[in-house]
Amino acid sequence: MTQNEPSFLKRGNFVIDNNYKMWLVELKQRLRSYQLKAAVKVNSAMLEFYWSLGRDIVALKAQQSWGSGVIEQLSLDLKETFTNIKGLSYTNLKYASQWYRFYSQSNTIRQQAVGELQMPELFGVVPWGHHIEIISKCKDTDEAMFYLKRTADEGWSRSYLTEMIKRNLYEEVGHAITNFDDHLPLPQSLLAKEILKDPYHFDFLELNEQHTERQLEDALAHNISRFLLELGKGFAFVGRQMELRMPGGQTFFPDMIFYHTKLKCYVVIELKVVEFIPEFAGKLNFYVSAADHLLKDSNDNPSIGLLICKSKDETVVKWSFQDIKKPLGVAAYELQTVFDKTLKETLPAIEDIEKALD
């Protein structure tokens, strides 16, 4: 390559090629499989029992036949015989009944059933505590299935699942404004929209309201693990402020570049601490073109661009995308709002503590 050709200047001695990307995907799948294998063996059989118990309670109309205390009595009788088996408490058996009732009303699950309604295979890889959290917090089975699939695919802990439900991730995923339908083939456009959300929550950053773009980018780079977690499964960090040098001597610096292992494409992310304006689309389009020319190889899908900004007007974004040929998306971000009050305002006064102790 001559100095008269555009190029990304790589810093360090690490270069991502297609072999590395495929190996990384395989390693992540293998590790996730090992993590889940032990939990599946322990939980799957018990989950099958809970499902069958819930089905029996509904089919036999147990509470109508033997009274409202039947589940509590059943718990005592089972624990008396199976003293070494955990999970037979009244609370667990009550949730088993609620669990089956919740999903047995789903047309999607019922359409897959032939004869007796069996527990879906997906349920067996999700721990029982997660199931309880999901049926307790989700409004319907579509929302519940979304969180079940994410938990199974990404290995969410129960606390992380709780946080995602609280943040209403189900409503956020796929809500970024994009032109993917116009510039990506159907299977990839659907998947690409699923990996983006709106808004992104940067509540792990300690920034004041008047932060600059560089401060935002620096904070995200210093918290890259948390940022990757917020972006979601499949994002691999390639670099930030990679110098793009043009033959005429001009240089450009895209904020961040990632590779998405499931989409098999590069993702250029630009950060803006102001409301979206049309000029942002042109610059992001340029950076995506650069990624296609200089980073993408024959096995990769077209690169996509994501602009994360303070706020946006949907009409302004859509009009800005009308003559853009590269697949782009725009989403907003939110910072932590819990700390808007000062520590003095949130803690009780000394006088209040003394009164409480009297």
Image: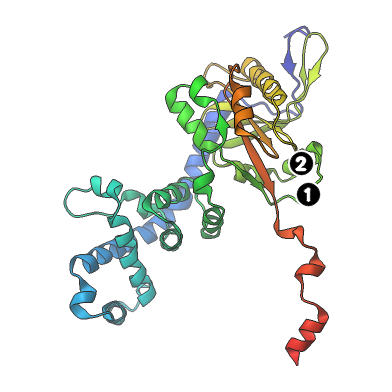
Residue in the picture at 77% in, 25% down:
253
Q: Is residue 26 left or right of residue 259?
A: left
Image marks 2 and 1: residues in contact by CB distance under 8 Å: yes
Q: Is residue 224 left or right of residue 349?
A: left
**Which of the 4 quarters of the picture holds residue 79?**
bottom left
**Quadrant that contains the C terminus:** bottom right
Q: Which residue is mark 2?
A: 216
Q: Of helix, strand and loop, which one carries label 1?
A: loop
Q: Amino acid at mark 1?
A: Leu
Q: In the rendering, at what x and y percent does residue 76 appear?
A: 31, 82
Up-down: is 84 above or below 287? below
Number of other residues with Cα within 10 Å of mark 1, as a class: few under 14, some 14 to 19, many 20 or more? some
Residue in the picture at 72% in, 9% down:
1
Residue 247 seen by the camera: yes
Q: Amino acid at mark 2?
A: Leu
Camera-side residue of 144 and 1 = 144
> Residues under labels 2 and 1: Cα distance?
8 Å
Q: Of helix, strand and loop, which one carries label 2?
A: helix
